[in-house]
Structure formats: structure tokens, C-alpha cells
Image: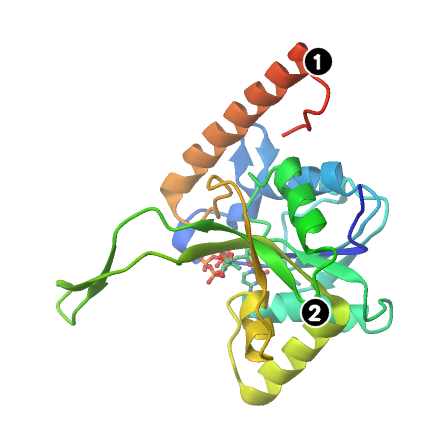
Amino acid sequence: MSAPQWLIVPAAGRGTRMRAACPKQYLLLDDRAVLACTLARLHEAFPEATLLLCLDAEDQWFHESMVPFARWQRLDGGDERVDSVRAGIDWLAAHAHSDDWVLIHDVARPCVTVADLHHLLETIRHDPVGGLLAAPVTDTLKRQDTHQRVEATVARQGLWRAMTPQGFRYGVLREAFEQAASEHFLMTDEASGVEQLGHAPLLVTGRSDNLKITHPEDLALVAQILRAQQDTSRLYLSDKEPGHEPI
Ligand SMILES: Nc1ccn([C@@H]2O[C@H](COP(=O)(O)OP(=O)(O)OP(=O)(O)O)[C@@H](O)[C@H]2O)c(=O)n1
Ligand SMILES: C[C@](O)(CO)[C@H](O)COP(=O)(O)O
């Protein structure tokens, strides 16, 4: 299995929509902080990668014991997600080669599976642009009018939900961040910055349960998904079927 050289994990969010007493990355899923769960998944998939962990400069909840990586670096995040990721991109200027692979993954997505992480990297590895995990939209989509009434039903064919990780070569990411800064374009994900350069990132089908914890009701759901994934994983192990990857 090949590995990305670098992982950037933006983890400096305040979790306003979660309305919890601490940032959502420190809420507990069973007995483990969300941040520790997410890093554990990334480490299981890519133990040799170097982690760049972007945290709020005033973070009071982080503890080094949450990081399983041998090589990692703490960086100060910024006001928006894009600013936190930019801290990683800037740090890499002195450390990465332009063709190194960089995967960026939200700390708020602890359910990403090892199989999907490997699948993403294997799929984009030989691609000239790079890509992201995503899932086709499954609900019927409505556009609202100014009174929050339905103005139109939007065709969902060809629409996807963008997830993370998103993986690109360092040189492409650097260029995307430089152009976004000079044009004051607010990237909500890295792919949109790469799209602004005129490239077409690959949509790599991932599991739809790679949820981003955003609202209070998401926490119990994510805890349930993690438990279910562990049960499936145990099933595979007890079957001892060759060729099954851990979840
Ligand atoms: N200034 C910020 C804002 C967000 N993030 C990270 O970007 C990811 C996605 O952001 P989001 O879900 O919007 O997180 P929050 O900003 O924490 O939530 P909210 O928008 O509800 O405040 C999360 O891993 C979050 O920690 C970050 O590193 N720095
Ligand atoms: C990167 C992302 O998770 C892809 O869905 C998303 O864009 C983050 O958005 P947010 O505005 O920070 O919630």
C-alpha cells in the first residue's frame, strides 16, 4: 500500500453549530475524543505519514497523547477552515517537494474508513490532478424562494456531496492557495481551489457514512456508526477471510 507523505488535519474550528461546552473535536465518542478517533483512523491507514495538526492557538483541551503518529507537527489554525489548512500549506513550503501527495482531512469526520482512505489514495495516485472522497446525492433537492417556500425541484443527477480527505500534489495545492488569496476567493474545500485553477478533481466514491459532525444530533449518530463499523470489522476478522481489509 502506498502512502501520502503528508496529512493536514484542520482541527481549529470552534463548533458554533454544535453549541457544546467545548469545541466538537473534544466531545467524547464512547470514551474517546473525536480528535483522537479521527487521528487513529488516519494512523491505521497511513502510519508512516507526517501529520500537520492545525489547532486553535488558545486550545485548552488538546493533549499530545491523542496523537498516534511518530512524526507530527502542531500548527496554529486561523479564523476559517481555509486559514487553518493554509497554515499547513505554508509550513510545507520548507519541507515538501512539489510532487508530494498531501491529504487534507477534517477532524470532524471520524467515521472515514481505512478502506476508503486506501481506495482514495490508490485511485488518485496516478492521476494528474488528484481528487476527493464524495458520495452521490440521494435526496430530492429543493431550491427555496425568499419566503422559504419551494421555488423549484433541482435535478440531482450528477450532484455529489463533497467529503474529506481531499488529496492533491503539493505543487497544485500551493498554486490553488496562492491564487485564492490573490483573488479573495473563499475556498470551502481544497477541490474548489483546484477547480479555480481550471483543473477537474476526481470524484472518488466513498461511504455515505463519512459524516461531518456539525449539529448536536450528529454526535450520537456518529457514535453509532463507529460501533457498527467495529462490529463489521470483528466479523471479518473472525471469518479470517483473506483479502478483507479492516474497515
Ligand atoms: N477556523 C477553522 C474552522 C474550521 N476548522 C476545521 O474545519 C473542519 C470543518 O469545519 P466545520 O465543521 O465548519 O467546523 P467548525 O468551524 O468547528 O464548526 P462551526 O462552523 O459550526 O463553527 C473541522 O475539522 C474544523 O475543526 C479549522 O480547522 N479552523
Ligand atoms: C471540506 C468539507 O468538509 C467538504 O464537505 C466542507 O466544505 C467543510 O465545510 P464547512 O463550511 O467548514 O462546514
Q: In this view, does 21 lie to the left or right of 196?
A: left
Q: In this view, does 121 lie to the left or right of 106?
A: right
Residue 154 sits above or below residue 206 on the image: below
Q: Residue 99's x, y, as percent?
A: 81, 67
Asked whether the viewer can see residue 56, the reply is no
Given the image, on which type of amino acid does mark 1 rest?
Answer: Lys
Asked whether the viewer can see residue 85, the reply is yes
Residue at 16%, 72% (x, y): give it: 146
Q: Residue 3's x, y, as percent?
A: 79, 48
Q: In this view, does 136 lie to the left or right of 194?
A: left
User: In which image quadrant can residue 174 be found?
Assistant: bottom right
Between the C-alphas of marks 2 and 1, the distance is 43 Å
Beta carbon of the mark 1 residue lies under 8 A of ligand 2: no
Secondary structure under the numbered disc 2 in the rendered image: helix
**Disc 2 to disc 1: CB gap under 8 Å:** no
Residue at 16%, 69% (x, y): give it: 145
Given the image, on which type of amino acid does mark 2 rest?
Answer: Ala
Choose the circle earlier in sequence order: 2 or 1.
2
| Location of mark 1 (residue) | 240
Query: Disc 2 or disc 1, which is closer to the eye?
Result: 1
Secondary structure under the numbered disc 1 in the rendered image: loop
Q: Quadrant of the C terminus?
A: top right
| Location of mark 2 (residue) | 87
Q: Nearer the viewer, residue 181 or 4?
A: 4
Count of number-bearing discs: 2
